[in-house]
Amino acid sequence: MATSLSQLFVAACGEAARPYADSPALEASLQRQLEAARAALPDVEVVPADFVRHLARGVRAGADPRAALDSLHGADIALTLAAARGERLALAELDRRLSQVVARALAHMRVPEGLVSEVEQQLRQTLLVPTQPGRAPRVLDYLGRGPLAHWLKAGAVRTALNLLERQRPGAYAPQSALEAVPASGPDPELLAVRQRYAPEFKAAFQAAIEGLPADERNYLRMYFVEGLTVEEIGRMRGAHKSTVSRWLARIRQDILADVRRRLQERLKLQPDELDSLVDVLRSQLDLSLHRVLAPEGD
Amino acid sequence: MECLDDNTVLELLQGALPVDEAATVHAHLDGCSRCQRWVAEMTRAERPEEVPVRALQPGEVLDRYLVIGRVGAGAMGVVYAAFDPQLDRKVALKLLRTGATREAQSRLLGEAQALARLSHPGVVTVYAAGVAGEQVFMAMEFVEGTTLREWLRQKRRPWREVLSVFERAGEGLSAAHHAGLVHRDFKPDNVLMGADGRVQVTDFGLALRDGGAVERVEASNGGVTLAGTPAYMPPEQLAGRAVDARSDQFSFCVALHEALYGARPFPGDTLKQVAAAAREGRVRPASRSAQVPGWLRRVLLKGLSAEPEARFSSLDALLSAVRRGRRRQVTLWQAAAAASLLAVGTAVGTLHAGVGDPVCRGAERKLAGVWDDARKSEVRAALLSVSTPYAEDAWRSVERALDGYAEAWVDQHTDACQATRVRKEQSEALLDLRVGCLDRRLQDVRALTDFFLRSRGEAVEQAVQAAYELPPLQECASGEVLAAQVRPPGNEATRAKVEAMTQRLSEVRVLSSAGRYVEALERADAVVRDARALEHLPTRAEALALLGELRMRNGDAVAAERTLYEAVWAAQAGHHDRLAAQARIHLVRVQGFQLARSDPSDVAMQEAAAAVARVGPDLELEAELATTMGSVRALQERCEEAVRLHQRALQLAERAYRPEDPRRAWMLSNLGNALNCVGDLEGARARQAEALELRERTFGPDHPALAGSYNNMANALARKRDMSGALEFHRKALALHERSRGPESAATVIALVNVATDLNELSRSEEALPLAQRALRLWERVLGPDSPRLVAALLVLGEAQVRLGQAEEARKTLERGLALAAGREDEDVASARFALAQALRDAGREPARAEALARQARDYFARHTVRNQVQLERVEAWLRGTVRQG
């Protein structure tokens, strides 16, 4: 009897997967993946040994391979394998998806006209032409942990950002959610208070932000600087948008309280002066968050 | 760590990173702006592809339409109120969301144009559709009114009334079907109920094709009304399959079911559950209380079939089934009516139980001691205790205003109660908030009536104004808006302080509306001092806003500006959106009108407009914003804008205020002045006449408040060179002031000068002379001989003397006037120079100086020709004559 798919798979996964070598469930999962790939790509050859080895790469060490396996995008892996081998039909299909993805992803970035085809060309080259003779083409880096289209999009956006950066360093500023926020009008008294304590004010705010865990800071930045929605952030955090909204509200309060405490420690202000200061901060909290979180030179 | 790789980003976006890896990834992301940007762009690329709808600012022009302001946003795009100068009408300008491709655009445009060709009373008229830049837009009829959803929410309505409205909407929808259009998004929010009683379907889902709506629901960013839409969609649309007219039929039936039974037909907490129920045809059992006849339910159920083939063949077929059923019902009803004549006695009781929900009756009782019969007669006695000719009329107007306010208050109170207790659409907590708000308004009424009783007859002149200026009840209408405000801290002590503070605020507000600025300012200062120590931002904001407004009314613009900014900040921080908007409107007045700044006031206007838009529909705020902006624009001599803004203000005021509200007269006068400014003299006169008529109705014929209207009328007539008309009204103003304020008051002097000026213009200077002399004597006695305010009286006296050939006296009078006016450059000074030039020539003195004076006057009039055309011509004629003679 020929070597079973699961034996091939376990061999590729390494020592940790040994206990699963004879699992019928594993064999069935692999069979399902193989059949699905073949059904999705009738004109492309799927070589079982090759295919299973690449599936194995997508499974994290230590994870239960059976569960991990079912979430992999097998047909997309098969397509990349065939394209890397230079199969004509696979290359054509990959090309088709590539141009579709590039056009869509870049439409949102509002890049200059000529850039779209440049990104497409460069990405195609990076994916299919090995950097050195004998090395595997980059398209084989695809692990199947998400749809191929998304992976291609990541490459497209990365390439576009690089090209833009090269064309005009620093030119590509994020579309800020707060660009439209007008600075509130000047109250001479409050302005004076704020100017007097500007360094302390800034330091307290910075310290409050720096006291947050990195991921919270990242999400805050995505919300305030990049203008992502609570829904989009929710998707990344695996949380419902209302959870994200509540989190945002809480973190605003926390930051205010923290800043107030720090100011109180550092400055011996009259209570009403401190109140005015915190009022100003409260009314401009989102703007301040934006300023502290945005990359320098924005 | 190096930059993230493509596989990692992919998992980060899906929220699929294992915890330990996520920590490393976030640590890197936190410090790497490249990767931050990459992740953000990736996320944005997930959004449905469309051209972002441009945000338009008031005053901006799109195609030929002038944007007035944003009205709302929906699934299809953003709607603005705009003005079409070509056809001189207001339109609703809708900017449509559209795909980025050329095809998507032209397809959308094609459908918009098809809609424009459709003409049916049940469909909102589309005047034009076009493309401006990348933006597809439609210009539509501006329907003043409300949506069907709002109409249904207002109160529980009998099924016949609901059905007849749906029939009319259905006819509109069916007309669209006949034109080959499918709505794709029919729901109660997309049916407009015009103030004129029309029912019109709008918001055709042009951009929603091939299941696009469902995609969009998943990707929408929360703010827009999309989320509600799928609830009305048939299974085929939810599944992304092709839709046709029968899909609209399904949505129509969902909406009708909701209107009749108070709930949508398919049960479920999530879209998934609802969709499953719809696919399986599991309609909620009919609630008995709805009293919907069986035949109507059968029509509904057929329209709600999961399979399009099982529904009616067309909406027309459904509508005729409804008509058949109703006709049958009428016959049955008549038979039943005949039978029930015998049993009338028992029927009445049951009927009553259904109509007036006893749970929520009794709001009137809360008026006891605040505005009941006893209180009324006390207030009446107080106002009539001083004998003034207009007190009786003023009392009647106060009574009318407060009766109206009390009635609206009871309605609101009842509605708030029913929303929670009867219709069950509002939580207990929101009910508490609304009742709390209404209680504060009642406190305002009590403060006002207390003030009337305290100040006895002295308050009578300002009483009407004060009664109409009670704070609007609108603020209490929405529990959600109130819920957004920061609540007072839970502890008993602070809550008591907040309550005491609102009580004091009510009292100050009354003093302010009664024109007692000095007293009000003093007390407002004290309130603000205490409010600063208070841990409750909305209350602090209210105190600051009131102080700011008082400073503004008292003319202390610089201090007002500072305080109003503080109020805005506190209101924003305390989520008191309406107050923030109100304070921003005051800031527009302070900066644009009182401080007459041009650039910052443009910003102030935008900020105020944005703040008002944030509050949501609020006619009073919108009207106030428009009229304030109009006054600023008039001052800046941007007359056409001023006219448009004042027109808009009036339209809004017609719905926001009661017909006899004095603020409407004020807005009419503003419009009249702006019309003068664009040269529409007859329009200006007509508006001033309307304003006068309205004030007469509100205040009675003897009230001093009419004087302003008389003067406005006189000015409008003078601009038309109808000097005898002007004289008539200036005389009325004079008589009124002499009666109500006494023969020696400042107002009387000004009125005397006006009358004398008209008489001069009419070449009746022999009559003008004694009046001018009397005015001058009165002023001198009050102000002393050297006051610059004597100039106007000296001018009119000098002019009379010139005309009467008393050249020497005229010279003395006018030299004195010009000396007092040293440093001024205005119309009075220019006129005085010209009069002096004439006097000098007539007296045969200093010919060179006379000519120089006349030239100076001419230069001034030439620079300000809009108002001074006649004077300019006169000076030029005089100069020509003099030069010839010379």
Image: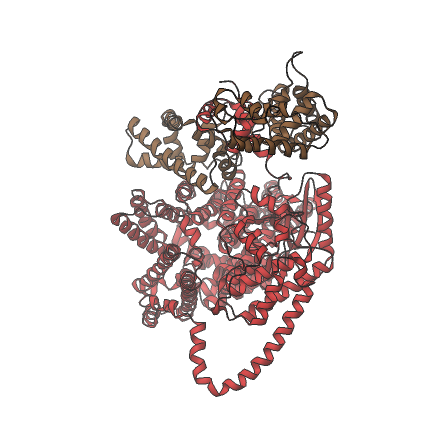
- Residue A216 spot, x, y in % from top left: 43, 31
- Residue placed farthest to the top in the image? A133
Q: Residue furthest bottom?
A: B342
Looking at this view, is A105 or B737 the one in front? A105
Q: How is the image coloured?
A: by chain
Q: Which chain is red?
A: B
Residue at 64% of width from left, 33% of height from top? A35
Q: How many marks?
A: 0
Residue B708 vs residue A264, the one in the foreground: A264
Q: Is residue B147 above or below residue B838?
A: below
Residue B701 in the image: above or below residue B601: below
Q: Is residue A272 left or right of residue B617?
A: left
Q: Where does the image place residue B827, in percent across and percent down from the top left?
A: 56, 47
Tell me residue A277's x, y (percent). Answer: 36, 34
Q: Residue at x 33, y 37 (%)?
A: A275
Q: Could you tell whether A110 is left or right of A270 in the image?
A: right
Tell me if I can see residue A109 in this picture: no
Up-down relation of residue B28 to residue B137 (above or below): above
In this orientation, which residue lies closer to the viewer: B658 or B391? B658
Which chain is represented by brown in the image? A
Q: Residue furthest left?
A: B493
Q: Position of residue B782 (x, y in %)?
A: 39, 54
In this view, the residue in front, A20 or A108, is: A20
Looking at the image, residue B320 sits to the left or right of residue B57; the answer is right
| Quadrant in the rendering for residue B277 | bottom right
- Image quarter of the C terminus of chain B: top right
Work out whether residue B532 can be spotted: yes
Whether residue B407 is situated above or below residue B857 in the rendered picture: below
Q: Is residue B55 left or right of residue B340?
A: right
Q: Quadrant of residue A9?
A: top right
